[in-house]
Image (spheres, grey):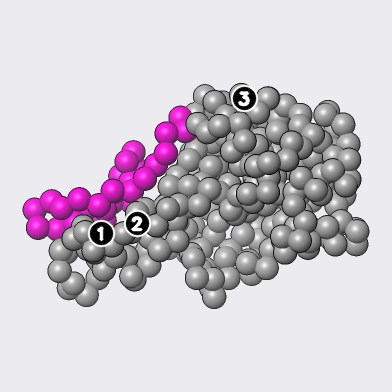
Amino acid sequence: MANGQWYPPEWPDRIRALAAGTLTPVTPKRAATVMLLKDTGTGPAVHMLRRRASMAFAGGAYAYPGGGVDPRDDDHQVRWAGPTRAWWADRLGVDETAAQAIVCAAVRETYEEAGVLLAGPTPDSVVGDTTGADWEADRAALVARDLSFAEFLDRRGLVLRSDLLGAWTRWITPEFEARRYDTWFFVAALPEGQRTRNASSEADRTVWIAAGEAAAGYDKGELLMMPPTIATLRQLTAYESAAQALAAAPGRDLTPVLATARLVDGEIVLSWPGHDEFTKHIPTAPTGGATA
């Protein structure tokens, strides 16, 4: 493989099974991930983590902080700043309850995995340093799901700052994958006074890296990434600052990107609509792997 595209060895067999009608797709789980940005003077850098090689899903791949929606965030109205839940529902293409849960997941996962919290004591403020022992105890409780994000915000009297997020894109894991996610990607700027750290048990390293530099590492085969990760990095290279990227977010198309597998001239063609660089040609019968 010339580049760093994540391509599990079991995919060809699963794609053939799906095409043959012998594989039943699993229902994707709702998820959110955040491209956390900071300005460097030469364009924004993005915070990325490398998933541990032992991880069942995308082990060794570079990604952004993110994870699944906690159903408990559907049914408790948190203190909220920024666009209304109705606005977010329209933007994300879901109902208001789901919109709150997805936005909560984006903010919670950024705190759990990067130690950065997009919330403050008032609608126009953000907390400062979150590295103290009491903060760490709450973060650990969130990770363990002993504490819901709504409970965490209530206990600390915090307002969720939805205005600090911009919805960027939406990708759904292919139907042939064993683990499937319907993931909304957000952009956010690192709040003043806060700093990132590797707070995730799922990552073995974290980096601040320019989007263009990360994309170049992928192109050289040095950085392993899933298609949505490298696709969003390429999109970020068009912006000179975090503020520019955030300003562009409301105008971006959130039509879900879902890979398709179809039979063409005796082979299965795997493609992601609008992203031709990820297209794969797979023999209809096993011949030792996919061809590029």
In the image, the segment drawn in magenta is 253-280
Magenta stretch containing residue 51, yes or no?
Answer: no
Q: Residue at x 76, y 61 (%)?
A: 146
- What is the distance, in whole Å, between disc 3 and disc 2 at their CAs? 31 Å
Label 1 sits on what residue type?
Leu
**Quadrant of the frame with the N terminus:** bottom left
Residue 268 position by quadrant: bottom left
Q: Secondary structure at mark 1?
A: helix
> Residue 56: image x %, image y %?
50, 70
| Nearer to the camera, 31 or 169 | 31
Q: Which mark is first along the chain, 2 or 3?
A: 2
Q: Residues within 10 Å of mark 2 (few under 14, many from 20)?
A: some
Q: Residue at x 76, y 29 (%)?
A: 81
| Nearer to the camera, 193 or 238 | 193
Numbered mark located on residue 18 in the image: 1
The answer to whether 51 appears left or right of 173 in the picture is right
